[in-house]
Image (cartoon, helix red, strand yellow):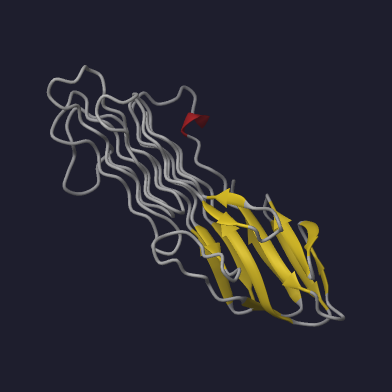
């Protein structure tokens, strides 16, 4: 899910409109699941808390890596955004005015007609939040790599997962060269990398070489051990309860 949630402390004289409005204790929460505007009138808001989640990437075609989860940024105390830094971002100020909200869509490889037989996944779109003096940008998740007869490396190739908020998983090697496509990188304060596509080990039945799982906001993508089911798990999303509900955001897609 790509989403914006703004956690506004109640200030006397302030009037704020935009999104779906709920309350959490003494705070008002404005939730956007599509792009729009936040309009602030009356008293300035010196410290707006937010959760911003970008669109996730799609998996590639064939024996593909999973798409990376959309990047997650959070300024909610005790609830960091994604990635290994564990960072809680600073709150932002909003004076009276209109602020643009962009909610990024997820990548969709299958939107083409006919779908491509062999292609990397499509990156998710960025989500942005304008504020007084700047913009908060969560980076779309990276698309997954696709199965390739030869590993393309070093350097990016179509079998590699793409970089993003969280990285896409690498595609599987077909047939089995020394390694599959590399997982894409994540943004350090938004998400984790994808996992490499898994080669088939000697003595294992063919085909048994899934693409790697896409990275998530809370952990890197994964792959099952040799002999396990023909799939890989995406990395977990990260918990945030900005609106009073405990949900996980920015999970990565599984490889196949």
In the figure, residue 182 lies in which quadrant? Answer: top left
Snapshot quadrant of residue 120: top left
Front residue (pair 109, 209): 209
For image coordinates 26% across by 27% down, the residue present is 209
Identity of the residue drawn at 53% across and 43% down: 106
Above or below, 44 against 37 in this view is below
Residue 196 screen position, x and y as percent: 27, 41
Extreme residue in the top direction? 205
Left or right placement of residue 239 versus residue 100 in this view: left
Q: Residue at x 52, y 70 (%)?
A: 88
Residue lying farthest to the right in this orientation: 13
Image position, residue 139 (x, y; %) = 47, 57
233 or 170: which is nearer to us?
233
Q: Residue at x 24, y 47 (%)?
A: 156
Image height check: is 226 above or below 222? Answer: above
Given residues 237 and 44, the one toward you in this image is 237
| Quadrant the C terminus occupies | top left
Q: How many marks?
A: 0
Residue 160, position in %: x, y?
28, 41
* Residue 105 image point, x, y percent: 57, 46
Horizontally, residue 50 falls left or right of residue 18, namely: left
């Amino acid at each position: 899910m790509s989403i914006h949630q703004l956690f506004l402390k109640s200030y006397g004289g302030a009037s704020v409109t935009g999104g779906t409005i709920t309350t959490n204790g003494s705070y008002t929460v404005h939730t956007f699941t599509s792009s729009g505007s936040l309009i602030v009138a009356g008293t300035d808001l010196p410290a707006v808390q937010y959760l911003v989640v970008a669109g996730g990437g799609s998996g590639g075609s064939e024996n593909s890596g999973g798409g990376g989860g959309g990047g997650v940024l959070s300024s909610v105390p005790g609830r960091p955004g994604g990635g290994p830094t564990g960072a809680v971002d600073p709150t932002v100020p909003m004076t009276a005015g209109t602020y643009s909200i962009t909610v990024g869509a997820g990548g969709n490889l299958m939107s083409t007609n006919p779908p491509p037989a062999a292609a990397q996944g499509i990156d998710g779109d960025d989500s942005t939040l304008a504020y007084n003096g700047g913009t908060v940008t969560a980076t779309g998740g990276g698309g997954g790599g696709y199965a390739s007869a030869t590993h393309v490396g070093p350097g990016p190739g179509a079998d590699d997962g793409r970089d993003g908020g969280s990285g896409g998983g690498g595609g599987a090697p077909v047939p089995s060269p020394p390694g599959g496509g590399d997982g894409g990188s994540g943004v350090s304060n938004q998400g984790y990398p994808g996992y490499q596509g898994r080669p088939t080990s000697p003595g294992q039945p063919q085909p048994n070489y899934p693409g790697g799982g896409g990275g998530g906001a809370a952990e890197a993508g994964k792959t099952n051990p040799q002999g396990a089911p023909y799939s890989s798990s995406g990395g977990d999303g990260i918990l945030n309860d900005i609106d009073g509900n405990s949900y996980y955001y920015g999970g990565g897609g599984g490889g196949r």
